[in-house]
Image (cartoon, helix red, strand yellow):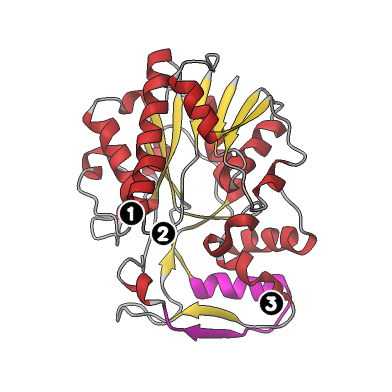
Amino acid sequence: MIILTGGAGFIGSCFLWKLNQEGIKDVLVVDHLNRDDKWKNLVGKSYYDYIQKNDFFNAVISRQISKPRLIIHLGACSSTSLTDANYYIKNNYEYSKVLALWAFELDIPFIYASSAATYGNGELGYDDDLAKIKNLLPLNIYGYSKHIFDLWLLNNNYINKATGIKFFNVFGPNEYHKSNMRSLVCKNYDEVSQGGPIKLFKSHNDNYPDGEQRRDFVYIKDVVDVMYFLFQNTSKTGIFNLGTGKSRTWVDVSKSMFVAVDKKENIKYVDMPDYLKAKYQYFTEAKMDNLRKVGYNKPFMKLEDSVKDYCFYLKNKYYL
């Protein structure tokens, strides 16, 4: 049995799809299904059983869960706009420690989600070298909650028992439920496909013109391929960046959308909300050397091809 927390979420459900594609169905899905449409991500998937995250946590504490062969821990609050620090610490940090210690006790592989948000504004670069991670300065409590779990593993010499993945700007099918945390493509598809504009934030950094802020956008199909590689090679422990290694601008994404839906370019710039200005990342670009060194050599899709593929899913309201 494989335990997959966050298995109904965006990345989790797509990884479940990938496992199913590979003929793997003995998966215990853990998540928190409430009033949103996240449950739709599980429709058509094959898995062993489902359990709500609090019930699962209590079962782990009381050791009432059968020994799995592997834990993939993707469950977390990924919002960068909430302000309840206590919730992030409880949900993202302490929950993760309990699961990790259980995995170490059972001597089974533990794969978990970290985040590019741990890199802050990038003043120290985007290098997943373990020696540099302790110096990172996250800009928001989400990034901090992920960062301190990375540090906990490092400080307690557990990192050789775990595999962390620092996700950059992941986009693609199954993110539909994420409200304001959806990608630019998902948020704007309906309006753009009808000839409307894309609204991009103005820049408040003199080094970046409006729309030229840069991110490492990585498509979900590439993401699950990398995750499956790490799933198959659990001896590859440590922390790995997961982006494409090449930053692109928001204008690049927008232009790709207009081409994909065969509409004329129409970009409008709007003021960035005040609450974002102090914690906005103007540039991210994953240093991908570590992943390549452990043997992952498949190329990543070009942004334009990824956006075109995603627009097909959006047009037809398809899920992975």
Q: Is residue 154 above or below residue 107?
A: below
Residue on which the image places disc 2 = 82
Circle 1/circle 2 CB separation < 8 Å: yes
Q: Nearer the viewer, residue 296 or 278?
A: 278
67 left or right of 112 in image: right
Q: Which mark is residue 191?
A: 3
Q: Secondary structure at mark 2?
A: loop
The quarter holding residue 154 reads top left
Foreground mark, 2 or 3?
2
Element under disc 1: helix
Q: Secondary structure at mark 3?
A: helix
Q: Is residue 3 visible?
A: yes
What residue lies at 42% left-to-right and 68% top-to-bottom? 214
Q: Residue at x 41, y 78 (%)?
A: 272
Q: Is residue 72 magenta?
A: no
Q: Which residue is mark 1?
A: 141
3D distance between C-alphas at marks 2 and 3: 27 Å
Residue 129 higher or lower than 312, as above or below: above
Distance Cα–Cα, label 1 vs label 2: 8 Å
Q: Is residue 276 above or below residue 220?
A: below
| Image spot of residue 19 (x, y percent) | 65, 32
Amino acid at the residue labelled 2: Leu
Residue 234, position in %: x, y?
A: 47, 24
Q: Residue shown at 64%/53% (left/top)?
A: 36
